[in-house]
Amino acid sequence: MKYTRRIFTLIGLLISVLIAALLFALVPTAHFAAAEDVTAGGSDGTSDEGTGETIEEPEEPEPEPAPSVARVTLGSLSAEYSDISAALAVWGEGATLTLLSDVSVSTVTVSVTCTLDLNGYTFQGTSGRTLRVSGALTISDSSLMQGGEIAGGGVRIERGGSLTLASGYLTDNTAEDGAGVYVSDGGTFTMTGGTIAGNTVTGNGGGVYVSGGATLSMTGGRVVENTAAGDGGGVYAAGEVALSGGASVTGNTAGGEKSNLYLAAGQQISVNSLSGQVGVSAPSGGTFAVGTATGFTSDSSAYDVHSSGSRFSLVLSPLDSVTAVFVSAENVYPTSDVQSLRAGLTVTGVNKNGSEYPADMIGYTIALPEGVEALTVGANTIALMATGNGGETAETTFTVNVVAPSLTGIEAQYRQSATVYFDSAPDILVPDLTVTGTFNDGLTRPLGRTAEETHALSGEDYINASYEIAGSFEGHENGVVTVTVRSGSFTAPVEVTISRHVINTADIPVQDAVEVERTGNWEVSPAAFTPELPDGVTASIEVLGAALSGNLSAGTYTVRIDFSVTDEKNYELAGGSRQATLTVYYASLTAASEDGSVFFEVTREGGIPLSWELSIEDVTDEVNAPKLDSGMESRQIFAISLRDGGNIVNELDTPITVRIRLDSFFAEKDVTLYRLAADGGHIAVESTRDGDYLVFTTSSVQAQYAVAYDAGFGMYLALTIVFGVLCIGGAVLLIWYFKHKKKLDMSLPKQDE
């Protein structure tokens, strides 16, 4: 059921389409029939008397019918129209529009296949393009003289459209490009006859413009006397061009010069038995056509047409002579590169035809004449060798006037490496000073203090500039002074850092001082340590840990020596304070330890005796007992210190022997002596037992010593290990029992209930 309904629907749609097509085909016929009825009813002057009816006479005569301007013909049907708009309205598929008089129209769009018969009349456009063709239009002229014209805006062929010009004229048209015919990309223009003449464009292609992707085919007809402001006075071809038969493109101009058919870059013409005359030009030489032809000419006198078999090429006419003219707004200097002269050089050539050779096709080299090494001030002759596109050569010379460069400014750079003082001479700057001059030839050159020095630096004896230094360093402020470098009328500032004379205190002789057997109040003098001071430097001293005056105790003192200057603007000190040693000796000073058991004397340098004071103090109750090796336990700790006339002595160059009294606790025990280090460690010291005394030798006389005995910690350790083994064994036995308890219970005999 559903399938049957679909069949009926399709049949209904097909019947509707056939009815619509039939009505559309009958529309022109209906128009033509109506036109025949009108013509037949009122154009022959007969009356309606044959009908037997009485017709009243009109009060006023009927107006004369308007003259026909066009006729539209479709097959055997034809109708004439007094209004061109009415005729255009019925000018449809397959119809021919024949002009019966000159007409004026706005742009007419042709989208069907049809024919326009000019019939000797003018089809005049009033705005924009006269015709826009997106269908297939044929233009012909059936008049005897075939003088019909399309004027105003010419014809534009849109993409997919085609135009065939069989006869008639496209003339007096204006546009930006392609005033006669503009062929858009995808359009086709076929010219079998007719003439395209007298058209003008502000761009390219006065007669015909062929876009890239468009096609022009000429088997006859003429394109003559058209003009363009750009290229291609007759035809501008960026698309395909095919020529044959008597097709002719001559007498056209572009930019006032002869220009007939202009081929855009990379385009070629396909020719087949071309007998007509066609002038050709292109952006450059090379092959422009392939096929057979007899009438090609070059539009440019710079090129000749050359044929080789079926290939036609534009070849530059050989270079015959050249002329070189040097005109430059800038000066030429002796240091100028010869090749830089090309910027002001104009080279023109003449070819064998006597016309101008394209300047961009002339290659040339310039060089100094043989034997000349460089440009010199004055007139210089330069040789030029030109080469044409075909390898032909021509020679000439030109003259260049060379001038010496002049100074336009200077620049001074100073990299200070030497120390400059307020009393230095300006020449001290020269080794670190670089002065360069800027010259109007665009180069910079080093300048010396004399013209000869400048010549030696630059190697150019025509440069006479030199520099001088003006100023001094005495009036410096904040350590910086600006001096001036001058060359001619040009100056450049130079900043110089002025240094004060630096006196390094490390270089000032400092010596130790010795005071022996001084009694009473006395004062320490700086002269004792710095007997010689540089000019302007003074010294002051401080005895560290003591006053500068009074009765100093015997011993060695450190003295700090401070220096100062009297002229801080020009002098400064470096290195800071210095130190020296002050040694004070007393021959009669003696001292002993607290218990009076230790006393000794030494002899110092110069045979001067000096007593040392050795202090041995039991400090067992004042310090924490140290941790010693194994089971050793300290019982007594002694602090030993040695003073040299009030100064603490840490280490001795020669060891001394020390005796210390032991506690009665050690009467029957073996003891070991340890020296306690400041970091908490301890070092065993070799010692001997002498009754209640322990005797040892040491160089460390500012240290603590511990007397220790073996407390038996080794036995305690053995008992601890045995106890630990027993505990671990018991634990293992308990674990085994609980793990096997169930099996043990099952293996035991059960008691009777």
Image: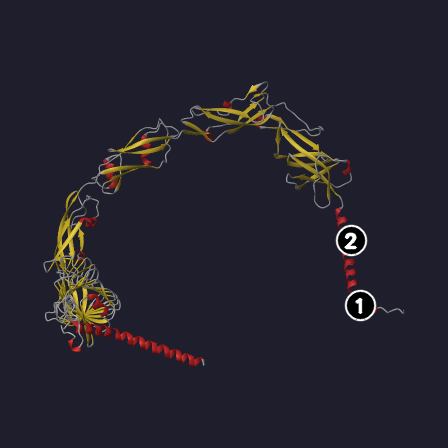
Q: Which marked residue is nearer to the observer: mark 1 or mark 2?
A: 1
Determine which residue is flagged by label 1. 743
Q: Is residue 131 above or below residue 599?
A: below
Q: Is residue 540 above or below residue 297?
A: above
Colouring style: secondary structure
- Quarter of the image where one finds residue 613: top right
Residue 284 in view here: no
Q: Which residue is depicted at the point 20% across and 76% down?
A: 75
Residue 157 lies left or right of residue 615; in this view the side is left
Residue 496 in view here: yes
Q: Mark 2 or mark 1, which is nearer the start of the sequence?
A: 2
Structural crowding at the residue carrying mark 2, measured as other residues with C-alpha within 10 Å and reported as few (<14), some (14–19) or many (≥20): few
At which x and y percent is residue 481?
35, 30
What amino acid is at disc 1?
Lys
- Quarter of the image where one finds residue 13: bottom left
**Could you say which is closer to the camera, residue 307 or residue 132?**
132
Determine which residue is flagged by label 2. 723
**Could you say which is closer to the camera, residue 87 or residue 390?**
87
Secondary structure under the numbered disc 2 in the rendered image = helix
What amino acid is at disc 2?
Phe
At which x and y percent is residue 10?
38, 78
**Could you say which is closer to the camera, residue 175 or residue 706?**
175
